[in-house]
Amino acid sequence: MCRNNYEQEGFVLVTVMVLLITLMVLSAAYFFTTNVETTTVKAYTDSITGFYSAEAGLNIRGEKIRERFEGFDRPSGTSPDQEDACVENNTGSGDFKCQEFSYNKREISTYVIEDPANNAQSDEERMITISQGELFEGLNAIQYRYTAASEARPEGRERPEAILEMVFNTRLVPLFQFGAFYNKDLEILPGADMTFNGRVHASGDLYLDADDASLNIDGHITVAKQGPDEGGGGGLLYRKRKDDGFYYNEAVYVNDGAQYREIPGSQDYIDQGVLDAWGGRIETGLDPITVPEPDILDPGGLYWERADLVVALDMSGSEPRIIVPDRDDTLWDPLEIYEHDYMTDTLNAGECIDADNCSDPDDDPTPREELELAYSYGDDSLLDELEATLVSEEENISLHRYPVEASRSFYDNRENKEITMLEVDMPFLLARMHESVYDSEMESLFSQGPDENADIDDDTDGGLVVYFTVVGDSPEEYGVRLRNGERLGACAHLVSDAPEIQGLTVASDLPIYVQGNYNLNYPGSNDLTVDHDPPLGEEDEDEPVEPEYWRPAAIMGDTINILSEGWSNDSHSHDNNLCDRGAADTRVNAAFLGGTDSTIGSDYAGGLENYPRLHENWSGNTLHYQGSFVSLNEPQHADGEWEYGSPVYEAPDRDWKYDTRFNNAGYLPPLAPRFVYLKQERFIRLFER
């Protein structure tokens, strides 16, 4: 039977329409699914972007808190109430207030909450011991706890995409807890057997070796990379010399906590995988850490600003003058400094005494103008000659002396030039500082310090800080010499009622020369090898020994130089015959912060064993040292290269120890420098506030 063509055409039309409808449904479903997926992906992407933007806000606030601790400052202010934080007038103040940032087209709102425990009365209450397994384990740190809050929302919207909180600790680690801390490459290459009992840190590379000797390191070793400003390299440990790449067959041992293990010599760096055998006591490749800048010792810098007393050698006139700068009126310019007239007069009030140190005043003084002139210009040989002449004539000898005087009696063979010194009689200066507080005719020498009503037993910043500099001339040919520092206290012959000092830091942008014993533990002992009792390391670190004399002390300068107990400022101090400059056994108990030379190419710079610069023939004599070596950079003014032998120096026997008393915050020197780092405690994501 024949079908009608119209019926066939209708069937085809229906089929096509059904297919079209099916395709339309499938297309709609596809577009709907795609749109949902796109929306989901966009929402997820926005959420991730919001999360990272809010996290950036946390990091910014954490870094701002860390930066506030640099230079011995501390964050302050009030936090907003967490209920409706950062809304209308609920914004807080100071370092904790609400702050807004823009990032990734997001508006980021942040604030900080301070833990109430931060306001404990003393650092001892905030002191922690860093836990085993953490970076810098075993060190003591002053810890402050904070919570940073951050919200991120797209521009123009009120609903946040991410709400985050981070609880973190800011840790302040005193640099003087390290036996040696270098903010650059560090080389330890002793030529005689050496055991170093302190921690060792280098922000750069560390080179260990020993020449015909053995080197034992008892403390932890950390090696960090340099920051971008220093080049960004480093962080490696080498068992060889830096200058020629050679390594000796003598042993280098590091304590793994149970026993000493040898680090074998190698032309290449020692991989951290090998060093893991020391159980975490050797860590290399650490991230850069932030330390104080070397300019903290510059005039106008931290120690200038925070010092109890600033003393300057003024070279702007026809004759050198010792002055006290007026820190309130001085806009710092070395050539345009203002003098504090009354404080200068107080400092320069002379005393008639009959010796060149803190001694009994003469009952019937006969001041000799020529003697005053001789010493004020530092010609000790002339002074000796005049005294001998007067003695032979049976005349009574007496002269005016001052706490700080100018001297031209020292020739530095390493610098190859004469050094004009600020001569500081330590007990005399402390006596004058105490006297100025109570003498109505004197201006207190504390008038421009942190506490104008203080005395020498002041404990602001941990004790006294005295700063020395030169004005009116470039500092390259000047130095500070500390004399009579065997006991850090006021001269009892000049003032009878002075309290004991709590601690003393001497700081300067100039090289510092320590002459003779400094800060002994006990009086009257000629045997310097038994100066510490009980033996070092056997005392309870929580209850350190309290010797009769010892005080927390630091010496900070462009370089640190030691002149022995045998040093004499006679004519031989100016010649280049080293045999005429024989040393004597000497003990120094103080933390050091100073510049040190760096080995460049094949020019060896002396290494840690030559941190303190020496100027005598020490052969057969011992330099006993107990403290901490910190070097933040190369010297800024003293540029003489390291040289061994005549006419500069012959090495001593080195009895060097880290002073474990520095592990206790109460025994750190005043204004002890520190590095700061953050330790995250907890990270929280909230979904509503």
Image: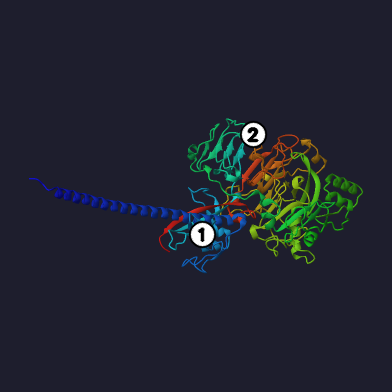
Residue 529 visible: no
Q: What is the C-alpha distance between the residues marked 1 and 2?
A: 46 Å
Q: Nearer the viewer, residue 185 or 662?
A: 185
Residue at the farthest left position: 1
Q: Nearer the viewer, residue 335 or 569?
A: 335
Residue 351 visible: yes
Q: Which mark is residue 429?
A: none
Of the image marks 1 and 2, the number of the one nearer the N terminus: 1
Q: Left or right: where does residue 320 sit relative to residue 672?
A: right
Where disc 1 sits, the SS reads strand
Q: Amino acid at mark 2?
A: Gly
Residue at (48%, 38%) from the top-left corner? 273
- Coloring scheme used: rainbow
Q: Amino acid at mark 1?
A: Tyr
Residue at the farthest bottom position: 89
Where disc 2 sits, the SS reads loop
Q: Left or right: where does residue 628 sit relative to residue 259?
A: right
Image quarter (top left, top right, bottom left or bottom right) of the C terminus: bottom left
- Look at mark 1 in the image and give the residue it sits on: 146
Q: Nearer the viewer, residue 429 or 182?
A: 182
Q: Which mark is residue 601?
A: 2
Q: Left or right: where does residue 131 sit relative to residue 209?
A: left
Location of residue 618 in the rendering, given as x and y in whole percent from the top left corner: 72, 38
Vertically, is 575 above or below 116?
above
Location of residue 597 in the rendering, given as x and y in whole percent from the top left corner: 67, 40
Q: Left or right: where does residue 66 sit relative to residue 422?
A: left
Location of residue 24 in the rendering, given as x and y in whole percent from the top left corner: 27, 52
Classed neighbour count for the residue bearing mark 1: other residues with Cα under 10 Å, few (<14), some (14–19), many (≥20): many
Classed neighbour count for the residue bearing mark 2: other residues with Cα under 10 Å, few (<14), some (14–19), many (≥20): few
Which of the 4 image quarters holds residue 338? bottom right
